[in-house]
Image (tube, rainbow, N blue to C red):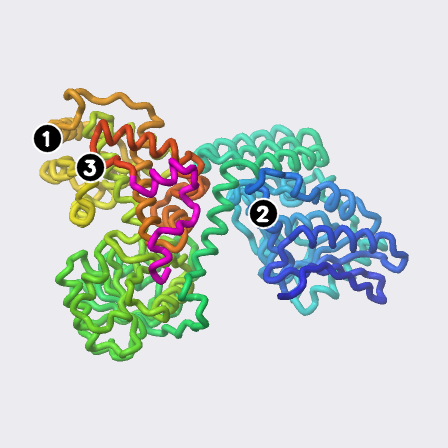
Amino acid sequence: MAPVKVTMEVGTDGVAVITIFNPPVNALAIPIIAGLKEKWTEATMRNDVKAIVLTGNGGRFSGGFDINVFQKVHANGDTSQMPDVSVDLVVNTMEDGKKPAVAAIEGLALGGGLELALGCHARIAAPRAQLGLPELSLGVMPGFGGTQRLPRLIGLSKAVELMMTSKPIMSEEGKKLGLIDAIVPSSELLKVSRQWALDIAERRKPWMRSLHKTDKIGSLSEAHEILKVAREQVKQTAKNMPQHLACIEVIEEGIIHGGYNGVLKEAKVFKDLVLSDTSKGLVHIFFSQRATSKVPNVTDIGLKPRTVKKVAVIGGGLMGSGIATALALSNTIVILKEINSEFLQKGMKAIEANVSGLVARKKLPQDKADKALSMVKGALDYSDFKDVDMVIEAVVENVPLKQKIFSEIEKVCPPHCILATNTSTIDLNIIGENTTSKDRIIGAHFFSPAHIMPLLEIVQTEKTSAQAILDLMAVGKAIKKVPVVVGNCTGFAVNRTFFPYSQGAHILVNLGVDVFRIDTQIASFGLPMGPFQLQDLTGYGVAVAVGKEFRSAFSDRTFMSPLIDLLIKSGRNGKNNGKGYYIYEKGRKPRPDFTVLPIIEESRRLANIMPGGKPISVTDREIVEMILFPVVNEACRVLDEGIVVRASDLDVTSVLGMSFPSYRGGIVFWADTVGAGHIYRSLKKWSELYGNFFKPSRFLEERATKGIPLSAPSSTSSVSRSRM
């Protein structure tokens, strides 16, 4: 590994070039910060140094503060491990230093990296360098003075937008806004930056301390209005997340009481935010997502992924067309097969609509859209399958149909071709029952819409080869997904863990709890919508099909709700026909349909589970817990059976696949913050009142009674027995 260090070279021109070395992104680790202080102090004291240029090695300025430090602080609760960068280094040593400094930015300057650049007296950038302050996405806020300097350089409105969204801009936009002083080719970057620094030293260019600028802030009344609007927006878009409002407060402090007071408040609030549950959850997800790329006996045995150039997708419906779109966007040749020309035409049109939708939303330039569409070819038979590297079957959840397709493709595809299925619930051993190439059979479970949703659940059987898994992981990364490798069972990791989610909601409704109150409480907890609105969105047919699979696999803990059948009989099908639990009208938000209430009453009568025939009384918190604790209980079974490599993989899949709030750290992380003891006692109580659906699993009981976190590795589970 390359050494982590800060170097300084003083040229004959009297410019000291200070360079950060910490590949791959020159993160500001503790030794780097100490090295910057040391070299800056030395440069300031040396008589042969007239000016300073700060840059990063390897074509990257700096990706920001080393997030590993957050992890250590979260583990022991000691914020004294956080170095005093803002005042000690950026204000006192750099900005108020006796020698001018210029930041020479290439590649990226993000978070603390950009904040160091803001503390310099000018910023020169190479073309297309990324600039941004994404700290809010980790539950904190800029902590090295960014909340104060960015508004003073580019104006309050744009600065607030960049911080609140955590989205970077390119150096070209930075130049227009006043963040960047000049853009020069990479080959000229150091030369121009050195000259610029000398020009400041010799007063040919302004010696500008951005903390003291006021010309772009505007009047107090204008600032007050901008911040008021920002507060209203984040109350809508960032519910349950304290860092957004805290950041606005700190920006306001600097506007009212001056930049230096703002910096002091920023340093204090930053340390408070580091210890917040939100930061702990978001940092946990950040590291957990990276850990998914390590799969025992797959990624650690010296195999290299093979190149996958051509993929066949069978089925051009919602999922198939979405998968084909994702592949085509990554420059993979795609054969889309359908059973007749009418279905094929629909599938091809769906791909075109997906791509043009991305163009319309400015997510994709037109030339790349045209290239993607040129990669897709339609087919009505298997003649184009003779040289494909992978097949992804994406037809309806019908076991005989899937078995027939797998028998056929095994015969027509080359021997190296990976045979994948996009099934969301069916056991892979059943799908591949009639094949001989069981080492090539794998699950490629995408989430809808497949070209947008970030998760790819890779399902392995006991016979799937490590090479096939590795190849599919590489394809997943190439199409910008987060691939998570899981074991084989009904529902796999994500849908298996979450099948009690809608079941719990149906139990509550049939116990007499208001359907719209349930949805409101789940949305308040942080999911995008409640379970009933979600059911409206996915369609009742899906609910019936999936329910059947889970009842067959886990009959001891499933609940047969009469409600869905009653809704279908009454002519409702959710969003598909505009009528479900909610009314759907074009251009309007869904609104409760109170004509559904008599149908719910009929369901309650048929289910007959209300104690003494009367609705139960529950608090808002109990509603959330009665829906989510059974999900945690099933997660415990998934962990116990070794369906995932590590508990944090379930956290990632719950966030990326089920939209569980990322700031709560994922389903298992959240459960540990609530406490296994409380979850166990609650489920035990409900199981005695309302039946086996709530019965605590053996794993949960064991962890609760021994005081062991649910996320702690298990020595007895089948993880150790399986490949994973």
Element type at mark 1: helix
Magenta-span inclusion, residue 703: yes
* Residue drawn 75% across the image and 61% down it: 7
Q: Is mark 3 on a helix, strand or loop?
A: loop
Give the side of residue 719 with respect to residue 403, left or right: right
Q: Is residue 5 left or right of residue 408?
A: right
Residue 580's mark? 3
Q: Give the range drawn in magenta.
A: 697-724
Q: Where is residue 242 in the image (x, y as percent from the top left)?
A: 51, 34
Circle 1 crowding by C-alpha within 10 Å: few under 14, some 14–19, many from 20: few
Q: In the shown orientation, is residue 681 left or right of residue 168? A: left
Q: Is residue 66 magenta?
A: no
Q: Name which of mark 1 and mark 2 comes first in the sequence.
A: 2
Distance CA(mark 1)–CA(mark 2): 56 Å
Residue at the (62%, 38%) spot, across then down: 78
Which residue bears the numbered disc 1?
A: 606
Q: Disc 2 designates what residue?
A: 133
Which secondary structure lies at badge 2? loop
**Foreground: 226 or 97?**
97
- Residue 364 sits above or below residue 677 on the image: below
Whether residues under marks 1 and 3 lie with C-beta atoms below 8 angstroms apart, the answer is: no
Whichever of callouts 1 and 3 sits on the residue coming sooner in the sequence is: 3
